[in-house]
Image: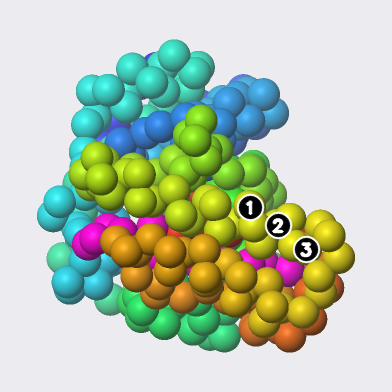
Amino acid sequence: MKVVSTIEEVRACVKTWRKEGKSIGFVPTMGYLHEGHGSLIQKARENNDKVVVSIFVNPMQFGPTEDLASYPRDLEKDSAFCASLGADLIFHPEPEEMYQEGFCSYVDMDVLTKELCGLSRPVHFRGVCTVVSKLFHIVMPDRAYFGQKDAQQLAIIRRMIKDLNMDLEIVGCPIIREADGLAKSSRNTYLSQEERKAALCLSRSIRLGQSLVEQGETNAQKVLEAMKVEIQKEPLAKIDYIKCVNGLTMQQVETIKAPILVAMAVYIGKTRLIDNFIVE
Ligand code: AMP
């Protein structure tokens, strides 16, 4: 497995593979990898000849008061993890490599980016769409793998490749959780012991919502209300949002009728965590 930091090096590898007729699977990440990322890499490994993982904490998708500086990083550990899963190439650029002097071109999206996380993170999805487009142009993958953990992001990327006629397949992968239910996240490392316990209110609330839907509840407000009450039992938790939206358009719905995304963002202390479930 190779670790490179320049666009030129990635292009050289990709060019060779293309000449050999190899297919390429791509997993974009911000690093500090865990089994959630691992599941994407494994899936890419199963379905492609070559697997590229990018590790880039993208400054453009962080707001001015967010955790860009403190976001956890460990390239050595990440490299060993990727190698153990059979990745072929890690692309780990510095911000200056991705955003050269005078950079002023962006990929923006309306509607889907204005809801859910877009309300409290207004610049986030412009940063995501821009960097993901750039990475797609650099890696030129046949397939790219994204987690359902970031369900809004996945819907936005699917919309973007459709709207902009990008010629690749987007593969969505299920949420990987800790044994006690907490969705795996690089940001879980921010949690103190007490906060780690408190964070279980998210997955408890998700399970409750899921079971209500499974029992036949179709009133979105009723499901959301029960989920809210579950979170509010936890004194360290502060709800940013809990919403029930159409899974494709991200617009709020009153009645639960597939495709539905029930998504939440909750602060545990200073750490903002997200979780969701889908009704297909
Ligand atoms: P990140 O490094 O947080 O930007 O995540 C990179 C990719 O890994 C995104 O497509 C995420 O949705 C995915 N991912 C992160 N956590 C999980 C998880 N617990 N289960 C499945 N996919 C995940």
Question: What secondary structure prevails in the magenta region?
Answer: strand
Q: Position of residue 206 (x, y in %)?
A: 59, 57
Q: Position of residue 198 (x, y in %)?
A: 35, 51
What SS does tag 2 mark? Answer: helix
Amino acid bearing label 2: Gln
Contact, mark 1 vs mark 2 (Cβ under 8 Å): yes
Please give the residue where the numbered disc 3 appears in the rendered image.
Answer: 213
Amino acid bearing label 1: Arg
What SS does tag 3 mark? Answer: helix
Please give the residue where the numbered disc 2 appears in the rendered image.
Answer: 210
Magenta residues span 259-273
What SS does tag 1 mark? Answer: helix
Asked whether, in this view, residue 268 is left or right of residue 65, the answer is right
Decide: few, some or many residues near mark 3? Use Cα within 10 Å; few <14, some 14-19, many ≥20: some
Asked whether, in this view, residue 94 is left or right of residue 146, the answer is left
Give 114 or 8, whichever is nearer the viewer.
114
Examine the structure image and report whether residue 148 is included in the region drawn in magenta: no
